[in-house]
Amino acid sequence: MPSSPQTLANPDQTLPRLLAAAIGESKAHLALTTLTIDPALAGTGDTVSRAQVAMALNAALFADLLDRVPTAQRYIDAVRGAGETIVFDHGALRTIDGETGDLPRGHMAFGRFLAPLGYEVVGLYPLPKLKMTGRAYAQRDLPETIPQFFVSELHVDQLAEAAQGACTNIFGASSDPLGETEWAALDTLASDGTADFATALTALKGVIACFERQHQPPALADYEVLLPETGEGAWIATEGNAFNHATTRTADVMALSDRLKAEGYPMKAAVEVSKNGRVRQTAIIADKVARPFLEADGSAVELDVPGSFYEFITRDIDPETGKLDLTFDSGNATGIFAVTRSA
């Protein structure tokens, strides 16, 4: 939420060393001094737990999103300037439940390597208005302090025939970034729950590579067929498997939304409220990014399209359990997804 600083800034600790080796010292320092991180994840020595790899992955994705989303960087600069840190609640991913070449289809494009990092599916969220299904992945060892992933998949077979064809053209020859070396490292984490530093680093670098576009730039004609049918599918066409958004957990998202609007942030008009009333979410409208498209004659053209974005969430205590309500809500997700649709 913002919170009092509780960061991992000691470069000799295991988690900072692992992250720096994967993404560089500067980006690692930025992430680890911005995020509120459970002290149990610091570590010493060269044995790395699956929980530490999971947190390092989230920190790496957070740093990458700041590079790609200027409004997110603006917000984080303000938080850091105030001497505060943030609680990283969850990140979101979008996948294609259709023909995807060498890449596993749907949520298993991510679920296959999240499992060795200790993640499991803890919630299923139908998104019928979007022709999608969402799944919440939580980390078993530290479910309240390691960010969750919300992984959604677009059901291509529910689209119009022309849009199905466009999806096949765009995604049907996707590549798989994970090879035998990366899988050997992930298998070690899966079987033992820990790995030596070099093996953990191999696994971490491998999974970071999975958050890129795994298909060629789309043909403009296919994109124009897909866009009116599914804005989410069009987003995946240009952004691929990129980190869709990162989310700050805050004490009062309503007040924060009003404040950020007053400060000129392009905020979503209304805050989404879950059916149980305990989960409230809003977001900054996605920044535009220039992306390449292929013309019919094989030439390339760049167009501005929606990129990734930054989200905010407030979670209340579940009175039945006495614990923080870590669930999601289909209605909230449907509303939040609108921030990446082109006008």
Image (cartoon, helix red, strand yellow):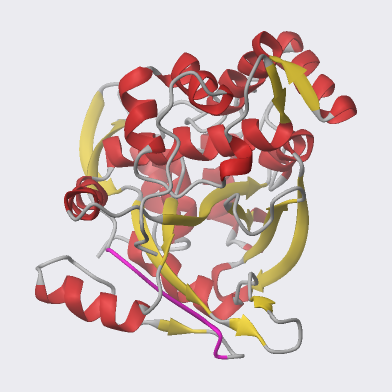
In the rendered image, the residue lying farthest to the right is 191
Query: Magenta segment range?
Result: 277-284
Which residue lies at the image location 42% right of the left edge and 52% below the top edge? Answer: 245
With respect to residue 179, does 324 lie above or below? below
Q: Position of residue 180 (x, y in %)?
A: 76, 10
Q: Position of residue 287 (x, y in %)?
A: 24, 52
Which residue lies at the image location 20% right of the left edge and 45% below the top edge? Answer: 70
Residue 278 lies in magenta, yes or no? yes
Left or right, residue 320 beside residue 83: right
Q: Nearer the viewer, residue 66 or 95?
A: 66
Q: Quadrant of the C terminus?
A: bottom left
Q: Nearer the viewer, residue 186 or 161?
A: 186
With respect to residue 170, does 276 lie above or below? below
Left or right, residue 260 beside residue 93: left
Q: Is residue 26 visible?
A: yes
| Marker count (numbered) | 0
Left or right, residue 23 beside residue 180: left
With respect to residue 155, does 264 lie above or below? below
Q: Nearer the viewer, residue 202 or 52?
A: 52
Q: Residue 113's quadrant in the figure?
A: top right
Residue 212 lies in magenta, yes or no? no
Q: Is residue 99 visible?
A: no
Q: Residue 126's quadrant in the figure?
A: bottom right
Q: Residue 186's quadrant in the figure?
A: top right
With respect to residue 63, does 299 lie above or below? above
Q: Quadrant of the N terminus?
A: bottom left
Instruction: Give the overall secondary structure of the magenta segment.
Output: strand
Q: Nearer the viewer, residue 237 or 254?
A: 254
Q: Position of residue 109 (x, y in %)?
A: 68, 38
